[in-house]
Amino acid sequence: MNQINQINQTTALHWYALRTKSRHEKLVRDQLDKQGIEPLLPTVKRLSQWKDRKKEIEVPLFSGYCFVRFSQLEKTPVQKIVGVVEIVGSGTRPEPIPEEEINGLRRLMTSVLPYDSHPYLHEGMKVEVVRGPLQGAHGILLRKEKRHRLVIGVQLIQQAAAVEIDVNDVIAV
């Protein structure tokens, strides 16, 4: 029975994230598709401006990443795709992405709702303000009702102050 489980794990298809070279996401997707390996590259339309004109272009939703569904047997061919830096994981093992997360992205892509990338921040995370009057300040991100707050503290005296902040003005540190 143990050998059957090992075979099933080796041939089971799972979703993984590929970190790609800068601006190689579409190239990686196309090469995977050519090899018969299922890629997923969520994209978003953005308005790009040149000196003489404006044009709507389609860019990757998550810059530097492409998703791919493969079995462990296909790991080596995936790693050899031009533009692939690594299969994202913990240590040396690729980490599968839950199917429901991929399904959520697919639903978003096929919906008519406007969407864009958003910083992956959660309550309690240490952040740095990158825009506005508090630029350069470090603190902890909190939520109070539907609003985000930045807590700036002095650890030595165990005191802090909180201020309302736009979550788009902070990055994780």
Image (cartoon, rainbow, N blue to C red):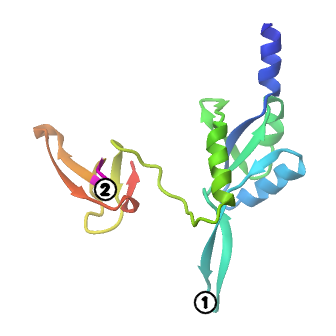
Is residue 65 among what the camera can see?
A: no
Q: Residue at x 31, y 56 (%)?
A: 147
Q: Look at the picture and state if 86 lies above or below 113.
A: above
Q: Main secondary structure of the magenta part?
A: strand
Q: Nearer the viewer, residue 119 or 91?
A: 119
Is residue 128 among what the camera can see?
A: yes
SS for callout 1: loop
- Residue 166 in the image: state x and y as whole percent: 34, 62
Q: CA distance from mark 1 to mark 2?
A: 39 Å
Left or right placement of residue 61 versus residue 80 in this view:
left
Judged from this view, the residue extending furthest toward the left is 157
Q: Residue at x 62, y 85 (%)?
A: 50
Q: Look at the picture and state if 52 lies above or below 2.
A: below
- Residue 9 in the image: state x and y as whole percent: 77, 22
User: The residue under label 2 is which amino acid type?
Assistant: Arg
Which circle marks residue 51 in the picture?
1
Q: Residue at x 60, y 78 (%)?
A: 47
User: The residue under label 1 is which amino acid type?
Assistant: Lys
Tell which circle, 1 or 2, labels the residue nearer the N-terminal end: 1
Q: Nearer the viewer, residue 39 or 144?
A: 144
Instruction: Tell me the magenta residue range.
Output: 143-149
Reading the image, the residue beneath label 2 is 147
Judged from this view, the residue extending furthest toward the top is 1
Q: Are marks 1 and 2 in contact (CB under 8 Å)?
A: no
